[in-house]
Structure formats: structure tokens, C-alpha cells
Amino acid sequence: MVADEEPITRKILRSARSGFIGVGVFSFLINLLMLTGPIYMLQIYDRVLASGSIPTLLTLSLIVVVLYSFMAALDMIRQRILIRIGHKFDDDMGTAAFSSYVDAPMKLGPQAGAAQPIRDVDQLRSFFSSPGITALFDMPWMPIYLGVVFMIHPYLGLLATAGAVILLIIAVITDRLARNAVKEQSELSSRRSQFADSSRRNAEVVRGMGMLEGISDVWNTVNRRFLRASARSAEIISSSSVVTKTFRLALQSGVLGLGAYLAVIQEITPGAMIAASIIMSRALQPVEQAVSNYRQFLSSRQSYRRLEKTLQATADVERMHLPKPTRGIATQSVSMAPPGSRRPTVMDVSFEVPAGSALGIIGRSGSGKSTLARGLVGVWPVVRGSVTLDGAPIDQFPASELGRHIGYLPQDVELFQGTVADNIARFDPDFDPNDVVDAATQAGVHDLILTFPDGYNTPIGEGGAALSGGQRQRVALARALYSNPFLVVLDEPNSSLDSDGERALMQAIQSIRKRGGVAVVIAHRPSAVRTVDLIAMMDGGRLRDFGPKDQVLDRVTKGQKEKAPAGQAAPANPQQPVRVVSSQAAE
């Protein structure tokens, strides 16, 4: 989707215009056929009872049966059209909503509702097949019924019109009162779901550290707020629904009473009196139905607006194809802030890493290393400056192409439900098995995978639950190396590795350099930067030093000695690796 184009939600709804027109035509015919009952009643009272003609009664009854059957067929077709419109909307919006759901935390920040775009699509699909939307299509035909009542007698028409105006006022008041309550309910529902999902993801920590009672108290607080908002919106709408229903019944009796008076003074017939009461009731029924389904209508309207806003905020701009990078990566005065935050955590970072090199980024916890890593691969936006591949800012690459040029191993490894091969191949449906084996071999995990029950076809379960932490990290490393990307960014790649895994990691970094790629390693442990040739020293979100590994580490060591008290050795800080072999020896 292009950010400056018409929103995809409007495009999809416009594509369903012919379906909505068809629903409108069917609604017109159905509402005309709704006059069958009152007209039949009128004929019974004024013709059949007056004449005592049985053939007339049978003929009228047969016509009514045919018309009601036709009306039922039209109503079923109308409902099926609306159901298909809803499912087509879901089908067309599904990919965009899922992509928006995945991208929202990176572009809108952690406050973005969990699975909210998907739930919004579900809400709209349900609304398209609900009684609420049929009431909206039936309501415009209310003047036709009121016109028929006017034809029976002007006084009856005026009474029915006054009642319709009062019901519409009730509907407007309901909208004003319920709108904020329904909005608050929706927001609290999203917050409640987020908290529940977070607690479930961290179930081991919650149980292992005895946090369940405290977490449950927080859940109960959020849940009670949600229930209060839900009850408030339900009370407003149900009260309006009761008032609407009661008023409509009273108005129907009022029309019947006025009709009886007009019949007594012989201005209308008894049949016209009954017909006017039925027609008026039918005219106002869509208003009552709309009020009864008003919460769903409000929720759907909010879902549509929220979905449109989210899709626009997370939309990717279409980019022209660019050549595969071959020369290197550079940053120019890069400043970055977490999504949804205005406070930079990385400021004015500039460096260049040519092809065939490996950069180690070191520094204390909270110095901005992982934030910088996310900026290098384009998953977090750059507030100022630019990250370039071969001189082209990475946001100039089409999103699908950029992913093929980049391998990324995040600090918190996440695998997906599927097979080992699926995860390594990044769920490419047309992956080449040779590329999967090659990536696994580079990561030193090929022999390990062969020991699994079904080898590369072994299901790993949700989140890779069937694998150990070290196995997940090595499979994720193979995923980062899949199809030999030019830039490979590894954030704490050896945090869960044993000695064999660390040797495989070192070999993988060397192979990236030998084939002319660029490796970037975020490191706390000295072994992770053993095979790099460049070091970037981060501190307080700024680049404090950059250059050849040996030179930078010498300066770090000297700085530590100068800061150490007299007679005391410099502290060995694992976040600032000083015990490493030289790059020449490592190579």
C-alpha cells in the first residue's frame, strides 16, 4: 500500500459498491412487499367480510402466500449478499491487517493494540451480516410507509411522523451517550487482551517466581474497569432500546385509537384503521432495530476508523527495484528513538563498514547497541540521519527486497510454529532445500538437525518449544544466514551457545566476510568479537570510539587503567572485551 494513496479500506468498500447497490434494490422490494399484510388486512375487512365472498378470500390468500414466499426469497438473498460482502472484505483486508498487526509495535510503539487490526476486521465482517446493517438499509424506506399512512388519513400520518421524529431523537441521544462508553470499552478490552497475552508468554516466570497472585490482582483491576465500561454502554443502549420499543408499541396503540375515532365518525373504514396501525409499526421497526444493535454499530464504526488510521500509519511506500548491495554499509549522523517515543536512545552515530568486514559493537547495558542493531536492519525508524547500503538509504529499498539482503538474529530469539526447514527458509513457500542445508551448514547446525526425529521436517512447536535455548539460537542463526544475505546483524549471538555453538558462530562470521558480505555483532562476551576486524564502542547512546579492533581495544584498556585507583588493577568488564586475540591471528 502506498501511504499517500486512497486508504485500502475505502478501496475495498468501493469495490463492493455493486453488492451494496444490489442489497439496496432488494431492500426496496422487500419493503414494498411488507405492505402485503396491511393491504391483505384492509381487503379482508372492507371486501371479504362485507361481501361474504369465499372465492375472493381464497384468491387473496393465494396471492398473499406467493408474495410472502417471494419476500422470503429476496430477504435470504439479501442476507447472503451481505455475508459475502463481509467475507470478501475480510479476505481482501486479511493480509493488510496482519501486516499492520506485525508492523504496528515497530511503527506505532508498544501502545499499539495487540491483534487490534485483526479484531477490527472481524468486527466489520460480523457487522456486515448482522441485523443492524439491514436496519440501516430498511430505514430510508420509512418515508414510503409514512406516505401510505398519510394517504389513509392526514391525521394518522401526522401522528406517525411525530412518533418517527421522537424515535430518531432517541437514537441521536443514544449515540451521544453511548459513543464514549463503547470507545472506552474497546480500549480496555484491547489492554486486557495485551496483559493476558503478556502473562501467558511469561508463564514460566510468573509461576516460577510466585508472581501469579500479584499478576492476578493487576488483571482483576483491568478486568473490573472493562466490565464497568461494558456495563455502562450496555445499560445506555438497553435502556434506549426499551424506551424505543415501549414508545413504538404505545404509538401503534395511539394510531389504532385515533383510527377507531376516525372510523366511528366514518372518515375511514375499520380495515383502513387496522392497516394504518400495522404500516406505522413497520415504518418505525427499523429505528427500534437500529437502536437495539447500536453497540455493534458504534463498535464497527470505531473499528473502521481505527483500522483505516492504523493501515495508513503502517503503510509502506512503494519503492523502485535497486541492485543487490555489494560495497558496504554506512551510517550518517544516525539518531534513533524507540517507536512511540520522542526521546532518542542513539544519537549522531556515523561509521562505514566495507564489504568483507565484520564490525563488533560493544558497550555497557543500555548504551544503545541493540537499538542501533534494529536501525541497521530497518525494523526501527531512524529519527535523524540515514543508514545506507552502497550509498542508498535502506528505506529506499522495497521492503520485500530489503529482507533478502539482510540477515538478523535478535537478542530474544523467536521461532514460529512449523518445521525446522520452514523457519530456516523464513517460511518461503518456494524455498530451495539446498539453500536451507547451506544455511544450516554455515551455522554449524546441520548435523544437529539430522539427529531430530524427522530431520529438517521436524515440527518445532509454538515458539520453538520443542528445542532447547541453544538449539533455537542456532536455528535462528541459520535463518539469518539463509540465502547468503549481504548484511548479517547478530545481537548477542552466543548468549545461549555452548563451545561447539560458539565455534560454529565464529566460522559463520568468517564465511560472511569471505563471500564479501558484512557482519555486525553486538557483543557482551569477548568470544563474540574474536573474528571481527572493526570495533564500535557505544556509551550513553553515542559512538565513543570506532576503528580497527586492536587499536580500539587498546584505547579501551588504557582508559580502564587510567580510571582505576592507584595500586588496583583495571576491572575486567565483560561488556568491554579486552581479552581477545588480534584480528590477524583470528583470521
Image: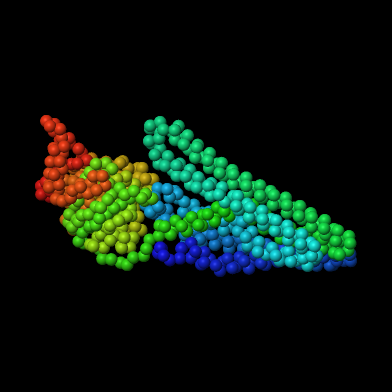
Q: Quarter-wise, where is residue 482 in the image?
A: bottom left
Give the left or right position of residue 368, taking residue 553 as reference. Answer: right
Q: Work out which residue is located at the far left of the displayed protein and give it.
A: 585
Considering only vertical position in the picture, is 226 above or below 148? above
Q: Position of residue 392 (x, y in %)?
A: 26, 63
Give the left or right position of residue 328, taking residue 26 as reference. Answer: left
Residue 24 in view, yes or no: yes
Looking at the rendered image, the quarter that the N terminus falls into is bottom left
Query: What color scheme is it?
Result: rainbow
Give the left or right position of residue 12, taking residue 411 as reference. Answer: right
Q: Nearer the viewer, residue 8 or 561?
A: 561
Q: Report the residue at 38% width, 61% height from top.
A: 316
Q: Quarter-wise, where is residue 281 in the image?
A: bottom right
Q: Position of residue 387 (x, y in %)?
A: 26, 57
Residue 436 in view, yes or no: no
Q: Report the residue at 52% width, 66% height from top.
A: 14
Q: Report the residue at 45% width, 44% height from top.
A: 194
Q: Position of residue 206 (x, y in %)?
A: 40, 35
Q: Report the residue at 45% width, 42% height from top.
A: 195
Give the left or right position of residue 17, taking residue 515 as reference. Answer: right
Q: Position of residue 108 (x, y in %)?
A: 40, 52
Question: How many marks do you count on the picture?
Answer: 0
